[in-house]
C-alpha cells in the first residue's frame, strides 16, 4: 500500500490512454508541482457524483495511475500537462486533503495472459469499427474507424476500451473488470448497445431528411 496524490475527474482514465490536463485550481497546481518533484505519478478516479472543482464529490474506488510525460507552467500559474495511464489501482482509504486529495492505494492485478485474448480482440474489432464509422456519420468527434491495435494482449485489450465511445459509467464498469477476457466481453456487449442506438439515430435522421 502506498500514499498517492489523487486527481478526481469527470472522465475515466484507462491504462495506455493519454490524458491531457489543463490545471488551474490552486490545489491541483500544488499537486502537479509535487508530482514533478517526485516520481511523476498520481492517481485518477472517476467522480461519480459532484464536481472536481471545489470538492464535496463522490469518487469511485477503482482508478488508474497516471504518469506525467510533459508539463509546462503558464505565466499566470496554470499548467498544461500530458500524462498516460499505466496501471489500475484500488483506493483503500482517502486521507485529508493536504491541500489536494491523497489516498492510500494498492495496485490491482490485470490478467491478460490467456491465449484467447488476441482471438477475442480480433472478433471485437469489426464491431468497434462499425460503431466508430456510425459515430462519424452522425457528425460526432471520435476515433477514426481505420485503426490498428497492438500485438501485445495487455495493450490491445485496453486500446479496445479506449477507442470505444463509452459514457463514464460504462467506462468505469470496464475499468473495474479484472480479467482481460471478461473486459473484452463487456466492451463487446456495450458496443452492441451502441450499434443499436446509432442505427436508430441514423434511421431517424434519414427519415427527417
Image: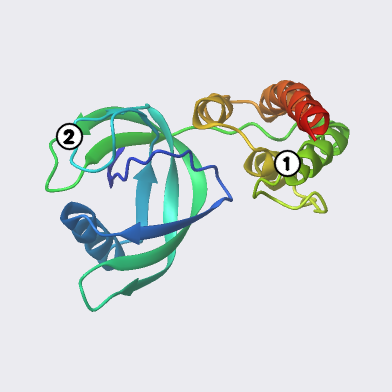
Q: CA distance from mark 1 to mark 2?
A: 44 Å
Residue at 72 percent across and 24 percent down: it is: 197
> Is the residue 6 above or below the residue 46 in the image?
below
Residue at 69 percent across and 28 percent down: it is: 187
- Where residue 153 sits, quadrant-wise, is top right
Is residue 115 visible to us here?
Answer: no
Quarter of the figure that contains the N terminus: top left
Mark before the other along the chain sequence, 1 or 2: 2
Name the colour scheme. rainbow
Closer to the camera in the image, 18 or 68: 18
> Is the residue 85 above or below the residue 106 in the image?
below
The numbered mark at residue 95 is 2
Q: Residue furthest front?
A: 209
Nearest-to-viewer mark from 1 and 2:
1
- Where residue 6 sits, quadrant-wise, is top left
**Residue 164 falls left or right of residue 200:** left
Residue at 65 percent across and 41 percent down: it is: 158
**Coordinates of residue 39 in the picture (x, y in percent):** 34, 61
Closer to the camera in the image, 139 or 159: 139
**Label 1–label 2 contact, CB within 8 A:** no
Instruction: Please name the residue that numbered disc 1 is placed on.
Output: 138
Amino acid at each position: 500500500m502506498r500514499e498517492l496524490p489523487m486527481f478526481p475527474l469527470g472522465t475515466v482514465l484507462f491504462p495506455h490512454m493519454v490524458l491531457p490536463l489543463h490545471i488551474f485550481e490552486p490545489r491541483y497546481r500544488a499537486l502537479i508541482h509535487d508530482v514533478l518533484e517526485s516520481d511523476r505519478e498520481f492517481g485518477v478516479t472517476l467522480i461519480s457524483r459532484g464536481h472536481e472543482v471545489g470538492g464535496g464529490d463522490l469518487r469511485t474506488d477503482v482508478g488508474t495511475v497516471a504518469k506525467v510525460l510533459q508539463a509546462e507552467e503558464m505565466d499566470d500559474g496554470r499548467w498544461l500537462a500530458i500524462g498516460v495511464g499505466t496501471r489500475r489501482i484500488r483506493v483503500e482509504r482517502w486521507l485529508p486533503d493536504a491541500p489536494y486529495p491523497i489516498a492510500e492505494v494498492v495496485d490491482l492485478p490485470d490478467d491478460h495472459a490467456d491465449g484467447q485474448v488476441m482471438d477475442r480482440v480480433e472478433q471485437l474489432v469489426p464491431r468497434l469499427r462499425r460503431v466508430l464509422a456510425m459515430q462519424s456519420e452522425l457528425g460526432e468527434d471520435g476515433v477514426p474507424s481505420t485503426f490498428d491495435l497492438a500485438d501485445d494482449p495487455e495493450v490491445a485489450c485496453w486500446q479496445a476500451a479506449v477507442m470505444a465511445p463509452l459514457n463514464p459509467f460504462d467506462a468505469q464498469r470496464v475499468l473495474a473488470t479484472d480479467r482481460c477476457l471478461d473486459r473484452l466481453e463487456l466492451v463487446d456487449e456495450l458496443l452492441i448497445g451502441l450499434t443499436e442506438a446509432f442505427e436508430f439515430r441514423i434511421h431517424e435522421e434519414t427519415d427527417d431528411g
